[in-house]
Amino acid sequence: MESLIYWLELINRLVWGPPLLILLVVVGVYLTVITRFVQFRHFGYAHRLAFTRDDDNSEGDISHFQALMTALAATIGIGSITGVATAVAIGGLGSIFWMWVAALLGMATKFGEAILAIKYRVVDGHNQMCGGPMYYLEKGLNSRFLGVLFAALAALTAFGTGNMIQSNSVATAIIELAPSWDPLWVGFILMIAVGLPLIGGIRSIGKVSSVLVPAMAFFYIFSALFVILYNFSAIPHAFALIFSSAFTGQAATGGFVGSTLMLAIQYGVSRGIFSSEAGLGSSPIAAAAAKTDSPGRQALVSMSSVFITTGIVCTLTGLVIAMADVVGQIGTNGEVLNGSALALRAFDAMIPKGGIIVTIALVPFAYSTILGWAYYGEKCTEYLFGLKGTIPYRLLYTLAVFPGAILNLNLIWDIANIMNGLMAFPNLIGLFLLAKVVGKENDAFEELLKKEREKKWVFSVKS
């Protein structure tokens, strides 16, 4: 097992090495320029849109709000808690800064992904929308090969990133608080709970997500803010550590593995993408199902999810860990704290029994993420094998929840990271080569917004 983990970690570092990091930055900068800094110009409007606009008469399966909640279901959660903690444990507190950088560029990347997903979406045999990188790679670039490559990698990634990591993190968190619990039971209960809503497909997942995601996000954000404000005096020092470590790396303390600048960047960017999925190519699959009158409109809704996940939830988690000063401590298993166990210890250190907050949040977070990724994997399977592949995929996906609860954390994270990086490559290539299409669609959307503003102005004058 140790030999396997060693090789996986080596492959992980190669996949998330300079080529992928440079490609992520180049695509993010290119889309930022070609959309004329859309993430800044329409920041406020993007975050209002999902909650104020209804395009029920437009083509699509779910509303703007449900599409956003489905995307957030797959992003906000484990990646925002366990992912941040893992990045800090390995890459140091400076990795939090590089998460912010990835998010800033990722907003433009996600805008481009969603525009292309809706522009090239199709209707399947069940009269449901299908879209995402596999379709815009095939139809936009005329590359069936890249489409198949992405779909195959994404379908496999769903088992690790969207499934087993979630059940593993829940089991770890529960056992950290209640050592007598058997992870087998955690996996079994979660497996049953996942299988039920998958029967209804995207409409069922969208309904569950639209209720569960806002409730769990509000609970965690409010609780984390309370913990931070309760220890207000430690905030300046925490920010100082984050910024100083971002450019110098972090030296080893106690049992903590020494972190270099490259590790901070690598784990900050990779965990940031794991959380926001910007550039990964998964979230535009949900965006393609939205009812919208313009690709640009839903693209803004999709873009807002990056700020919500990384800008808010990840930042709160990182601040609590930085303020608690628990990096490098030993857990109940005798190993250096990592993942959800580190987040639990941090909250416990800030307020009595604070770890309960993480456990309560992790369960619905993990559950919603499993559901969101189930949809992504299913649509990729449908692209590869047609509708006949969806039922077997749902069954295998549900069963995979169980072993995830008992496997080694580092093993699962390394596999998930490798798959995330591999599936990002064809998607980023497609985004770069189709950037001009994104620019044209953005220009058309800007014209639409201009006409809407003029109409409102004329109406207000006449009134």
Image (tube, grey):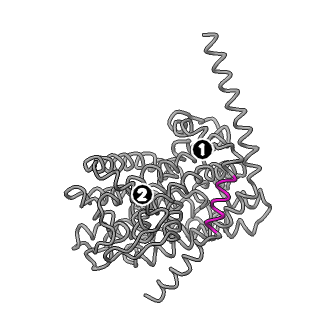
Against 339, is 215 above or below? Answer: above
Q: Is residue 458 left or right of residue 181?
A: right
User: SS for tag 1?
Assistant: helix
Residue 76 within the segment the image draws in magenta? no
- Marked residue nearer the N-terminal end (2 or 1): 1
Q: Residue placed at 68% from the left, 39% from the top?
A: 294
Q: Residue at x 61, y 66 (%)?
A: 21
Dot 2 and dot 1 residues touching (CB under 8 Å): no
Q: Given the current orientation, which residue lies at the most extreme left position? A: 352
The residue carrying pointer 1 sits among few (fewer than 14), some (14 to 19) or many (20 or more) residues within 10 Å by Cα, namely: many
Residue drawn at point x = 41 percent, y = 61 percent: 366
Residue flagged by tag 1: what amino acid is it?
A: Gln
Structural distance between the alpha carbons of marks 2 and 1: 23 Å
x, y (%) of residue 427? 67, 62
Q: Crowding at label 2, few (<14), some or many (≥20) Cα neighbours within 10 Å?
A: many
Q: Secondary structure at mark 2?
A: loop
Q: Is residue 416 above or below residue 334?
A: above
Q: Determine the image quadrant of residue 93.
A: bottom left
Where's the C terminus, which quadrant?
Answer: top right
Q: Residue at x 66, y 37 (%)?
A: 293
Seen from the viewer's position, the closer of residues 73 and 335 is 335
331 displayed left or right of 15? left
Q: Nearer the viewer, residue 298 or 127?
A: 298
Residue 381 appears anywhere in the view = no
Identified by mark 2, the residue type is Gly
Q: Which residues are magenta?
A: 20-30
Residue 45 location (% of width, % of height): 56, 35
Question: Which residue is denoted by mark 2 in the rendering?
Answer: 77
Rendered location of residue 444, percent (x, y): 74, 38
How many numbered marks are there?
Answer: 2
* Residue carrying label 1: 39
Residue 460, image x, y percentages: 61, 15
